[in-house]
Structures are given as C-alpha cells and as structure tokens.
Image (spheres, grey):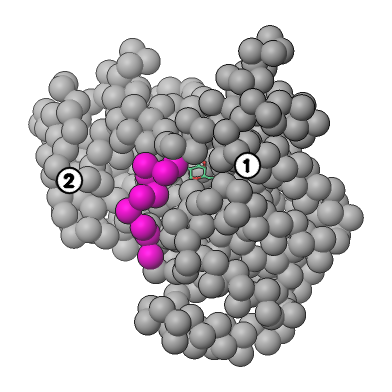
Amino acid sequence: MIAIDDLRQQFTARFSSVPRIYRAPGRVNIIGEHTDYNMGFVLPAAIDKAAWMAIAPAEDARSHWVSADFNDECYADLDVVERSSHHWANYILGVVKQFQELGHAVPAFNALIMADVPIGSGLSSSAALQSVVAWALNDWLGLEYGRKELALLVQRAENQFIGLQCGIMDMFASLNGKKGHALRLDCQSLDYELFPLDLLGHKIVLLDTGVKHSLANTEYNTRRNECEAGVRIISKARAGVESLRDVDLQELFSHQHEFDPVIFRRCRFVIEENDRVLRTCEAMRQGDLSRVGELMKGSHRGLRDDYEVSCRELDLLSTLADEEPTILGSRMMGGGFGGCTINLVQENGLDQLLFRIKQAYQEATGIVLKHYTVVTDDGASKS
Ligand code: GLA
C-alpha cells in the first residue's frame, strides 16, 4: 500500500511545491480472456494495488518526472513528444500525446510516480500508470472527459505510442472499477454492468509464475490476426459480420471446411469464452461459486489447448490447483505466456494450501512462487 503522505512529502522535498495526487488501480480478470479485442465480454475488477502520481506545474519549460520504483528520473520537452529511453516515461508521454492530438495544450509538469502493482505479472501495471496519467491530466487541465473516453484515450496511447495492440479491458477496469464489484463489460458497446462480488468466505488469490516469456507480445498480435482471418472468412458469406462477437458456434461450425484448423480453434475458443463470461455472471447472480469455479477451469483449458497462450508454469499452477478441494477455480489470467493464475480459494486453510503449492512449484521449476491476495477497489480517483 502506498502512503500518500510519504508521496506528498517526497514530492515537496524534490520539487518544493505542493502536488495534486491521483491514483489508478491494476486489475484482475475473473473470466473473459482474449475476448476484448474480439468485441466480446470480459469480467475484470479493479484491485487494491495501484499506480500513484503526484503532479504540479513545472517552473520552466521542461517537464521533470521521477519514478520512485525504478529509482530513475528524466526530463521531457512536451512541445515535441518523442519516445524516451526511460521506458516508464513512455507511458506518460503516450498519454500526453493523446491529449495534444485532441487539441489540448499540455504545459510542462513535474511528476513523481509510485506504484505497488507488481510489474510483468499480468495485473496491468502499465494500464494503471497510463490511466493515472490520463486521470490526472484530465483533472489538472480542467478537461471533462468521462471515464469511458479516457479509457479509449489510454488504449490509443498503448496501441499507437507503446505499440501493443491490446484491447480495452485493462484501462477500462482501472478507470471504471468499483469496490466490492466486478464489471461485466461489453467491449462492443462499452456498456457495462457492475456485479457485486460476494465471495462467501472465499478469496481471490493470484499465484505468480515469476516468468514472462518473450514471445508474449508477438503471439498476442498473432492471435489478433488469426481471429481477424476467421472473421474475414465468415464475412464473405454474410455481410455485416465485423467481429467474432457477431458469430455463434453454429455459424462457425457451418464454415469449418473453409478454415485452417488452427484458426478454427482460435475462433471457437473466443466464442465459447464469451459464453462462459455470460454464464459466470448468471452463476454469480445465483451465488453459485462452484459453478463460477468450473467455468474458470474451462477457460483455462481453452486458453491452453485451443488458444495456446498458456505455458508450462501456468499449466503447472492450474494442475496443482485442480488437486486442491479448497480451490473452486483457477485459470491463467491476462495475455498469457507467464504472469499469474487467478484462483478462487476458500479462506479456511489458505496458509497451509499456499505452503503446499509453493513447495510443489519450487520443486518443479526452481522458482520461488509469490502470491497476492487481492480485494476489489474503486477505479481512478483523486486523493
Ligand atoms: C492483455 C491485454 C488485454 C486483453 C488480455 C487478454 O491483458 O492488455 O487487452 O486482451 O491481455 O484477455
């Protein structure tokens, strides 16, 4: 947990001025993986780990930014926004550039960034950072963009400035999350519904593989292309099909003979995963957490066998979880090829359970397994 007073004091000591302070959280995703860029459904929640930004006007024309986590600092000239060699600063620059493209002058500012979202674990630390910058600039510049518009702005920053063709889930959850709730987002219309997350004596536990395989980004973009290839086949036969959201399983199967088998499996997974999100919401409405757990397991199987974005370490964690009766459901979370599994775990006996899994994981991989027990939190805010 970041101490706001500490952040404020560090800022003042550094820049001799009193900052405004903003925060935006990381996220978990209960179910609905790789469905966002296919215009489908996702079920994320903002969590109690966040990026914080203290900001005040700069005294001269140069912006001066400090990252407490990387113990690094840099200067930026916002008249010509260019990529920086300080990789964390690019997440600020990309968002600044989006505001400029909307016609807003962004004066030079001093900023201090601190975050407790683990980096590279699939909890959207970068979306949290970009969202806090967007939220801060929107308020500081007196602009009135809403949370949905800011989520789209952050997504454009990530797509265009950072170069990852991600969907909208991460920033949308960071900006729109609500404590005690998950958010069922329709990525086509951007309408969402808040679902009370009543976990009835269970906790959301993230188990961190401690790996991030280097193919994650290229494979992510490949999956997007594969889904688009599938859409092209079907849209030839039926006009108006723009994404896999417009296709059901029956229609997909009726075209199977035209499909490369790999592309077919990718598309089938996405359509099934969308359906799992809706069924999970239904099960949550009925308080049927065992069913939610089963659907999570189904999601993992699909991501492993059909979408092929899992890896040995994630599969190991999911297998270990399947052997534990107090884990209702477990699955890889986020883009894949590393990061965390999300687990729905009975509170009773949690310590012993973690001990067993950590031991087994370390024996098999040599990696010390980290875990995070998270609770839901509100989306971006000002302190
Ligand atoms: C990453 C992306 C998201 C989403 C997930 C997979 O987290 O940033 O947009 O596509 O992968 O569900």
Q: Residue at x 38, y 30 (%)?
A: 159
Q: Position of residue 154 (x, y in %)?
A: 42, 32
- Observer-side mark, 1 or 2, equals 1
In this rendering, would 362 be left or right of 206?
Answer: left
Residue 211 visible in the displayed image? yes
In this rendering, would 22 be left or right of 71?
Answer: right
Q: Residue at x 23, y 53 (%)?
A: 67
Three-letter code for the amino acid on which mark 2 is drawn: His
Three-letter code for the amino acid on which mark 1 is drawn: Arg
Q: Residue at x 64, y 13 (%)?
A: 236
**Which one is nearer the viewer's eye here, 20 or 254?**
254
Q: Are marks 1 and 2 in contact (CB under 8 Å)?
A: no
Whether 80 is drawn above or below 364: the answer is above
Q: Secondary structure at mark 2?
A: loop
Range drawn in magenta: 211-220
Residue 178 visible in the displayed image? no
In this rendering, would 124 be left or right of 253?
Answer: left
Residue 228 badge = none
* Residue at image mark 2: 86
Residue 265 badge = 1
How many circles with numbers are drawn on the protein? 2
Tell which residue pokes out farthest to the right in this image: 286
Whether 99 is drawn above or below 22: the answer is above
How many angstroms separate mark 1 from mark 2 (CA)? 39 Å
Between discs 1 and 2, the one toward the N terminus? 2
Q: Position of residue 16 (x, y in %)?
A: 17, 49
Q: Position of residue 140 (x, y in %)?
A: 36, 31
Is residue 40 a member of the stretch shown in magenta? no
Bin the neighbour count of mark 1 within 10 Å (Cα to Cα): few under 14, some 14-19, many 20 and up: many
Q: Splitting the image into 4 quarters, where does residue 197 fall?
A: bottom right
Of the 4 image quadrants, the one containing the N terminus is bottom left
Whether 1 is drawn above or below 99: the answer is below
